[in-house]
Amino acid sequence: MKINLKNLKQFLLPILIIFVILVVTVAVLKPKLETISESRRELIKDKKTLANLTTKVATLEGLARVEFSEKVDVALAVLPAEKNVPGNLSVIKNVALNNGLIVNNITIGEIGEIATISSTEKKAKDSILPFFKVNLSLIGDVKMIKDFISQIQSTAPLMSVENLSISQKKTEIPETRMTIEAYFLPFPKTLGKAEQQLVAITSGEEKIFNRLNEFSFFGSETNLPNLPVGKENLFSP
Amino acid sequence: MKQEIDFLKGARGEREKRLKFLRMVKTLSILLLLVYCLVVAAFFSYSFYLTTSAKKTSREITLKKSKIEDLKEIETLQVVLKQRLSNLLKFFDGQKKADFVVLLDYFNNRTQNVTIRELSLSPDGTIKFSGEASDIIALGQLLENLTSQESEDFFSSVVLSSLDKKENDVSYLFTILLQSKV
């Protein structure tokens, strides 16, 4: 079959146009489309991030700094960030004295638990808050002990009486041995990402804060109670 | 009347048809090129819009992040408060131990006719109550109190674990095991 070149020449323009379209599509448009698709995905993601940030800024601007600062002070007084053995002992001593009790003996739980850093790891599996134990021996009648427990459980820092044993020999004043758990909670390690939304304080947590507000506070006195210690002069009789 | 015979009429018609077809192909291909150019231009415009929007959004994100950085103090306060309150909520909700204050109040008010020798309270509500009753009537009174309708609100079980009569005396030493409800 003989190809008529003159006939083909007449179709040169449409063929050239189709060729250009194909070349531009493969060389330019296809990569551009991929870039557009990627950019679109990025933009949607960025817009979502921006929306989150805008909400977060609005939420943060809506929070009253002074009010929050006061609330955090109360929460930290009730639930300190670290073990404050002198502070806890001071409160126990003051509450005991306020109720007319004589502190016979105080011992602090396991020695290893005194270290602040190790506390979180040593936290009991079923307990929500880390704690250290204080074993206490008090002299006083049952009513005084009842008032002591009631007061110690509603005084900052947070403590709770776990075991209680009252014993009385003949006409002596009863002796009470009890175990108190003193709680604390280390600060969170990170604040989280900037775009991470703030988790609002729920109504249940607000109620807890109202409960904390009803706690008694003994100020910032953290002196250790005057307990018998070793001899100052080892050579004295 | 003069008449002409056109011998090329058929061939001319064929040529005109072909020329018409060629013109149409040319026009359509130019139109296709124009449409294609428009499509390409639309894609480039959209790409430009995306780039501009991305830059604008990125600028706004940086601005918001710096604003959040300025508000870091209040954010820290909120996070610390939230952490403490949520843990305390779980702590108070999870507390199922016996109410020692209520129990001590009960024993302080309802056991006046006997002498308490030992009273042990455990968080799980197990109570060991040892004491001395001056006579059998006082002991009976105590047991009646512990098993009364009113005491049912306090104890789920009351078991007299041991009872010994003292020699040369009418008094009794007793141990009662109780399970608290409060």
Image (tube, coloured by chain):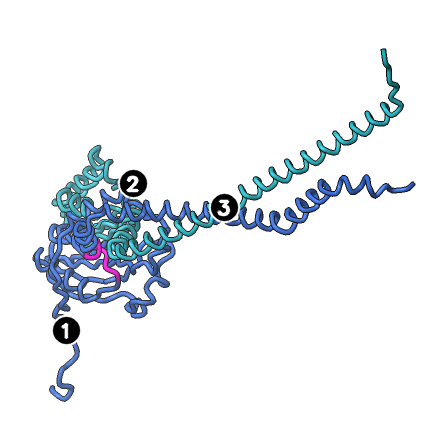
Chain colours: A blue, B cyan
- The reply to the same-chain question for discs 3 and 1 is yes
Disc 1 secondary structure class: loop
Q: Amino acid at mark 2?
A: Ser
- Image: magenta residue range: A75-81
Q: Amino acid at mark 3?
A: Arg
Look at mark 1 in the image and give the residue it sits on: A228
Give the alpha-carbon distance from disc 2 to disc 3, as whole Å: 71 Å
Q: Amino acid at mark 1?
A: Pro
- The reply to the same-chain question for discs 2 and 3 is no
Q: Is residue B31 above or below residue A30?
A: above
Q: Does A198 appear in magenta?
A: no
Chain of the residue under the numbered disc 1 shown in the image: A
Q: Residues within 10 Å of mark 2 (few under 14, many from 20)?
A: some
Look at mark 2 in the image and give the residue it sits on: B157
Quarter of the view holding residue A166: bottom left
Look at mark 3 in the image and give the residue it sits on: A40
Q: Nearer the viewer, residue B157 or A10?
A: A10
Q: Nearer the viewer, mark 2 or mark 3?
A: 3
Q: Nearer the viewer, residue A179 or A11?
A: A11
Q: Does A80 appear in magenta?
A: yes
Query: From this viewpoint, which residue is outermost toward the top?
Result: B1
